[in-house]
């Protein structure tokens, strides 16, 4: 049986959606439809977490087991709180190194999702949306560079969050977080890559 560890923040836990509708659980459901025997995901994620808070939580959980594959999606709260890009880079590297350890040391079994653009959502009404988009792009550029340098997979989902932000069907009731419909887009992209990777060993 394959095992899956999902590390992140509100976008991973699925703020305001049922647990089975977040992207880790939808990904598992899609993999099972492709006849992969995958256990329910182990999720370490809480709304509002920054990179250092996720790192602290990982230490507190004191996980000793390893997993068939790992996902990591973190950084939006660093940007939201106005932290420096350099701070994000340093702490993201440490998290990615830890994710590889959790994936039995196999970098190819770690999947990083890009940071969604919350500035495109109704929640950001009255904010400087262009500035948020610029900063999210800068974070994602660093995220992609570090991820690929580590030989992990990078999955860009920011485009979907921008495209679908005006459509309430893709948003949770708070007008900020994704709905199950948006998470389905992410799960589709992620599950295809995970399936291909697992088939390849």
Image: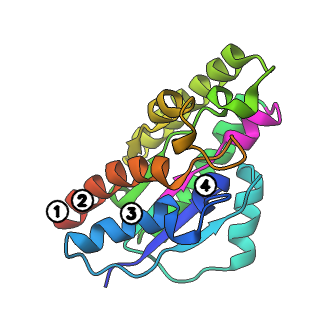
- The stretch of residues the image draws in magenta is 71-83
**Image marks 3 and 1: residues in contact by CB distance under 8 Å:** no
Cα separation between marks 2 and 3: 14 Å
Q: Mark 1 points at which residue?
A: 200
Mark 2 or 4: the one toward you: 2
**Image marks 1 and 2: residues in contact by CB distance under 8 Å:** yes
**Image marks 2 and 4: residues in contact by CB distance under 8 Å:** no
Where disc 2 sits, the SS reads: helix
What numbered label is drawn on residue 197? 2
Cα separation between marks 2 and 4: 21 Å
Q: Residue at x 67, y 14 (%)?
A: 130
Cα separation between marks 1 and 2: 5 Å
Q: Mark 3 points at which residue?
A: 27
Vertical relation: 94 (above or below) 5: above
Q: Residue at x 77, y 57 (%)?
A: 53
Name the image quarter holding the N terminus.
bottom left
Where disc 4 sits, the SS reads: helix
Vertical relation: 170 (above or below) 117: below
Q: Name the residue under label 4.
A: 95
Cα separation between marks 3 and 1: 18 Å
Q: Which one is earlier in the sequence, the residue at label 3 or at label 1? A: 3
Is 72 displayed left or right of 69 in the figure? Answer: right
Where disc 3 sits, the SS reads: helix
**Image marks 4 and 3: residues in contact by CB distance under 8 Å:** no
Can see residue 100? no
Q: Which of 164 and 168 is in front in this view?
A: 168
Please say whether residue 78 is one of the residues in the magenta stretch. Answer: yes
């Amino acid at each position: 049986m394959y095992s899956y560890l999902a590390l992140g923040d509100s976008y991973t836990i699925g703020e305001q959606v049922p647990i089975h509708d977040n992207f880790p659980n939808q990904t598992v459901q899609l993999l099972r439809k492709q006849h992969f025997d995958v256990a329910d995901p182990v999720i370490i994620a809480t709304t509002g977490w920054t990179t250092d808070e996720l790192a602290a939580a990982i230490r507190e959980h004191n996980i000793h087991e390893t997993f068939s594959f790992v996902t990591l999606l973190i950084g939006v709260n660093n940007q939201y709180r106005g932290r420096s890009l350099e701070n994000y880079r340093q702490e993201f590297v440490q998290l990615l190194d830890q994710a590889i350890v959790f994936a039995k040391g196999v970098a190819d079994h770690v999947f990083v999702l890009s940071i969604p653009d919350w500035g495109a959502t109704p929640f950001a009404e009255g904010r400087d949306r262009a500035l948020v988009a610029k900063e999210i792009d800068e974070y994602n550029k660093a995220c992609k560079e570090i991820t690929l340098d580590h030989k992990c997979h990078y999955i860009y989902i920011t485009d979907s969050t921008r495209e679908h932000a005006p459509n309430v069907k893709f948003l949770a009731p708070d007008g900020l977080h994704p709905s199950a419909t948006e998470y389905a887009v992410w799960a589709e992209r992620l599950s295809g890559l995970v399936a291909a990777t697992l088939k390849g060993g």
